Amino acid sequence: MDKIISKLLFLAATSSTAILALIALFIFKEGVPIMAKSGLAHFLFGNEWRPLQGMFGIFPFIVGSLWITAGALILGVPLGVCCAVYLAEFSPKKWANILKPAIELLAGIPSVVYGFMGVMWLAPIIRTHLGGPGLSILAASCVLAIMILPTIVGVSIDAINAVPKSYKEGSLALGATEWQTVWRVILPAARSGILAGVILGMGRAVGETMAVIMISGNATIIPNNMLDSVRTLTANIAIEMGYAIGDHRQALFATGVVLFFFIMGLNMIALKFSRRKF
Amino acid sequence: MTNALTAKKLDLYYGDFHALKNVNLAIAPKKITALIGPSGCGKSTLLRVFNRMNELIAGVKITGEVKIFGRTMNKINLLELRKSVGMVFQRPNPFPLTIYDNVIYGLRIHGISKKDILDETAFTSLTSVGLWNDLKDRLKENALKLSGEQQQRLCIARLIALKSDILLMDEPCSALDPIATARIEELMQDLKENYTIVIVTHNMQQAARVSEECGFMLLGELVEFGNTDRIFTAPSDKRTEDYITGRYG
Ligand SMILES: Nc1ncnc2c1ncn2[C@@H]1O[C@H](COP(=O)(O)OP(=O)(O)OP(=O)(O)O)[C@@H](O)[C@H]1O
Ligand SMILES: [Mg+2]
């Protein structure tokens, strides 16, 4: 009996890995030839995306994805971590018990709703008060920051709660204030957990498509500042897949390949940080 | 000489539960005082009165008068009080920081950031707990890598760095093996020259070995308090005698 179960589990493990490997292989098979054809450097660092003229430079989208993700993290991480610290350490238990599930519920709102709210409220505000087209990096970063908040808050609260109480007691017994204790002991101790939350949030920000298409303006240019419109790697695929054929279609798969490495690279950097204790 | 710690008519309630009942005691400075008694009699609770750690627990009510070197405890700034009355816990609890950052933690939180003062303090405190020679090249390593005994020494060094006057030790050796225990006891003897030590222990031999004064607690009462030798050879209370001769606890 045990043998059969272990065989079945083995089968499940290998087949799911195999499916993932096949998908990756397929994307690579479709995408790599066009990269070779237009030259890798040209593909990655070319500024011109004109599929009809056979010009496939995705640099503007790479820049767009980087800006929007960075913006979302700059806005979302401090907010999320502060929120988690407050809920885990300072707020009355009752509040935390209500607020934490409420924040996690925010993760259940479909991204199209976030995008819609961004287009209707945020973009006009940015347009009238800061200038530019409104649909911009800033708008997309704000929307994504809110979208990644539940992940960061939820995971960070769990990380902070997992810090042994004895650290806190030890610090307070040395005459530290609550705030000093949080800053000097609890946050460092919870760092790798919080970083895991940030990675998850970052993955969501990089991979988010619908809200980003709606709110980022989708211009195929390299942005000059936070108020410019941009297009991300994900948006590029989603917008053009409907009518892409031939090389164009392959170029979209190649965009997927880049996205693949992009996320893998980000994860690897983050992992390295989370493992480094000192 | 003023006593290091005095308590008069001290009562403590956890909600409705009467955990300390009319405790009166005076602890002399620069001596080792042991608190013994069966599990749940309130030893830790009493110890935690002296650095006001009980107040972290919701629903605790304390009445009576406690004085630290003659000053009424509640009139002393809480952070200053905890600085001068340090605590060593049952399970060694170094922070997950470097050894160096652990030792000088107390200085940093009390606003000292001059590098030469911090370095000097790290040296003197680690030396006085006998860790300097072993660890002087490992100061940047994570303190959690140390052995249990080293961790407990490091926790004592944290208090020495702060120049605490009183060291409260709640079963400091119960997570250690006999050899480490003997060495920590030795360290306590060294430290007593400069510090007032109050140790809670389950181990009566330990109390007899290290302490000069001893208090026996039972069900929240301090049944007997006095010279250790006298308590162990000629207890004046029947309950103390029963406990010491092993009839309960
Ligand atoms: N936070 C708390 N809330 C309610 N009751 C408590 C709390 N902490 C301790 N008590 C109770 O107070 C009594 C004294 O506890 P305390 O921890 O001081 O005993 P102790 O003598 O240190 O015991 P041990 O030797 O097991 O450490 C016990 O009956 C315990 O159940
Ligand atoms: Mg105890």
Image: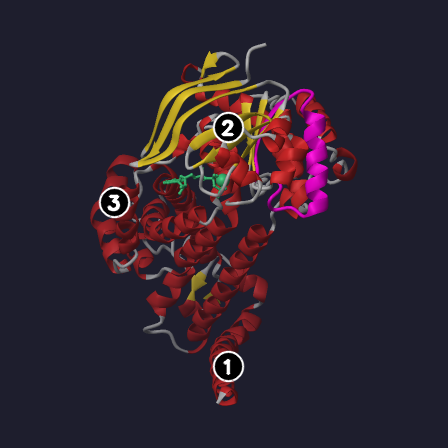
Secondary structure under badge 1? helix
Q: Magenta segment range?
A: B173-201
Three-letter amino acid code at the position of disc 2? Glu
On whether residue B183 falls in the magenta region, the answer is: yes
Q: In this view, does A146 lie above or below A110?
A: above
Three-letter amino acid code at the position of disc 1? Ala
Query: Same chain for the residues at labels 3 and 2, yes or no?
Result: no
Q: How far across and down, in percent of the image, does residue B76 sit?
A: 45, 16
Instruction: Specify few, some or many for label 3: CA neighbours under 10 Å numbering under 14, 14-19, or 20 or more.
Output: many
Whole-angstrom CA distance, mark 3 to mark 2, is: 72 Å
Read off the residue under disc 3: A122
Q: Nearer the viewer, mark 3 or mark 2?
A: 2
On whether residue A4 falls in the magenta region, the answer is: no
Q: How far across and down, in percent of the image, does residue B93 sit?
A: 57, 41
Read off the residue under disc 1: A18
Read off the residue under disc 2: B224
